[in-house]
Amino acid sequence: MTSLLFRDRNAAHSGRVSFIELFFDLVFVFAITQLSHSLLAHFTPRGALETGFLLLAVWWVWIYTSWVTNWMNPESGPVRVMLFVLMLVGLGLTTSLPQAFSSPTHGLIFAGCYVAMQVGRSLFMAINVRAHSHENHLNFIRITTWFVVSGAFWIGGAFSHGDARLGLWAIALLIEYIGPRAFYWVPGIGKSSFETWDVDGEHLAERCGLFVIIALGESILVMGASFAKEALSIDTTLAFLQSFITCIAMWWLYFGITASKASHKIATAELPGELAQVAYTYVHLLLVAGIILTAVGDEHVLLHPHEAAGVVNMTSILGGPALYLLGNLLFIRVTSGQWAPLHVLGIVMLIATGGCACYGALALNALGLAFASAAVMVVVSLVEPWLYRQLKPSARLHAE
């Protein structure tokens, strides 16, 4: 029975993403929507910080579940039940996101659901993997221990208020994000190693690619909903077009070359667990954050196209694409060993545009900033793949 709970790596299409995994992702479509709307409603330094913390938590729940379904067979009954339970608890977590920091009740719901998902899923793995792999059994005991420790800070923060809640939850997140890099060291058990994290690289690459699609889908929803409720005009039409062009450029940058090359790299890597941890567990968070921030900027431009350049416009309209380029740049670097020069130039251009607009050297309103940002993204998305194709065959083979 135990063997049926795990994927048969020798079977054809063993790494295929299952329909129940896609069904599970619907909870996180809602989560991304909640986060982007919360950030737009509270676009202050404190609001951005709190939204960033919540994004870190949401991503951590999703990516750990993706690691689990990389080993477990989602078609088996017990694994399906686990995912359904995680979906139910995840809905509780997601509905509490907008008031997680401001309301005692919602803060407790968020923290309780989060800890229940992380600890419960890890215990499920620790119990069921015992007869399958002793080393991974120890790994999930280690992971559970780390989540129990961080969980104390999550729950403690839920019973606190204001800065105390923010501080305790920051400690909880710090513990959890350090965990993989510390190999989940536990006294008496020791630490894990990359050799024991035998992942199906293609499956994890596809899962993370699908989450990028989820985030881009939120951008489509935001621009469509905002455009539909605004009075039709040249300005709103132009704002809608630039947001759509930016969304296409983001898709092109990731799925044009980067994602497929990285998938091949991790599928053939000697230590796929190492690449999976850095490139997919950590770096992809920057891509998702960049997309969400860009979506907030798109909605703001649709609502206020003639607004003067300000903090909100600078941070979202220019900062979102810059963060996305940084994430894709690091992803390329980790998976290929190469630097993407146009990504670096694009980030510099976005920063320079913001600086010039801030000090009056460029008289750009929100719509003008958005078109400048879209132009940078389009140039990078079109020219960078061309530069890659111009690499010498030996350099390209080395990159792959």
Image (cartoon, grey):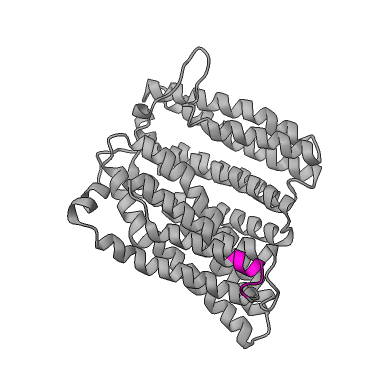
Query: Whole-percent x and y of residue 159?
Result: 79, 34
Q: Residue at x 43, y 49 (%)?
A: 330
Location of residue 11 (image quadrant): top left
* 168 and 336: which is toward the camera: 336
Q: Residue at x 54, y 32 (%)?
A: 178
Task: Mark yes or no: residue 147 visible.
Answer: yes
Which residues lie in the magenta part?
354-362
Is 186 on the left-hand or right-hand side of 53? left
Task: Mark yes or no: residue 13 visible.
Answer: no
Would you place residue 247 above or below residue 166 in this image?
below
Would you place residue 16 above or below residue 384 in this image?
above
Location of residue 355 (image quadrant): bottom right
Query: Whole-percent x and y of residue 229?
Result: 67, 78
Is 272 on the left-hand or right-hand side of 171? left
Q: Residue at x 41, y 49 (%)?
A: 331
Q: Residue at x 37, y 35 (%)?
A: 273
Query: Whole-percent x and y of residue 42?
Result: 74, 58
Magenta segment includes 115: no
Most extreme residue toward the top is: 188
